[in-house]
């Protein structure tokens, strides 16, 4: 096996655990390049954004605010050149307000696939992602309706 590919897969898994699952935005310093681009992420407020490291950390904090217990269950990691593709299942409890959706305390689930690009120093430089945002919206709507009889 390609040692560098394994290293990148392991780094990506650690990044997901430390930054996104545990919510340690400052841990991004160890994983993310000084400039990070969100190349494709429809429905994400940062779609198309180019972020510096502080901007990336702010994105993590804002994204986790409504779902502080979120977890990614990595289904697969596939290396291709300077990129690693991660397929995943995400789950969280809706604990904070989202515009139009007050917190319900109910679980939300989503699936997706993300292509993460690495630089020569094995730092993350960008992602291209597809997710089931319609499914999330439907769950939020159903949870809101059942919370307000």
Image (spheres, grey):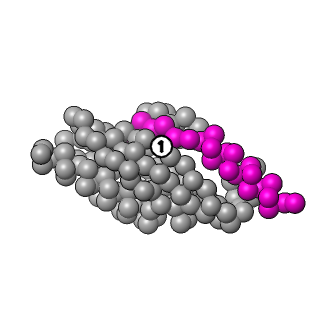
Predominant SS of the magenta segment: helix
**138 in relation to 147, above or below:** above
| Residue at which label 1 appears | 112
50 in magenta: no
Q: Camera-side residue: 86 or 123?
A: 86
- Residue 81 vs residue 149: left or right? left
Q: Position of residue 135 (x, y in %)?
A: 62, 44
Q: Is residue 55 visible?
A: yes
Give the quadrant of residue 45.
top right
Residue at 36% in and 45% down: 86
Q: Which residues are magenta?
A: 127-149
**139 in relation to 39, above or below:** below
Q: Is residue 126 visible?
A: no
Q: Camera-side residue: 117 or 92?
A: 92
Name the quarter where the N terminus is drawn.
top left
Residue at 28% in and 38% down: 83
Name the quarter where the C terminus is drawn.
bottom right
Residue sitting at the far right: 149
Query: At numbered mark 1, what does the secondary structure look like: helix, strand or loop?
Result: strand
């Amino acid at each position: 096996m390609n040692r560098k590919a394994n290293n990148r897969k392991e780094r990506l898994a650690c990044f997901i655990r430390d930054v996104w699952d545990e919510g340690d935005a400052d841990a991004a310093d160890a994983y993310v390049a000084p400039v990070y681009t969100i190349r494709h992420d429809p429905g994400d407020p940062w779609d198309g954004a180019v972020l510096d490291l502080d901007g990336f950390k702010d994105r993590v904090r804002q994204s986790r605010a409504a779902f502080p217990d979120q977890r990614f269950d990595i289904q697969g990691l596939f290396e291709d050149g300077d990129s690693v593709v991660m397929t995943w299942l995400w789950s969280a409890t809706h604990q904070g307000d989202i515009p139009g959706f007050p917190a319900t305390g109910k679980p939300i689930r989503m699936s997706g696939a993300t292509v993460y690009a690495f630089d020569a120093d094995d730092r993350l430089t960008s992602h291209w992602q597809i997710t089931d945002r319609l499914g999330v919206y439907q769950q939020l709507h159903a949870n809101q309706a059942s919370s307000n009889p």
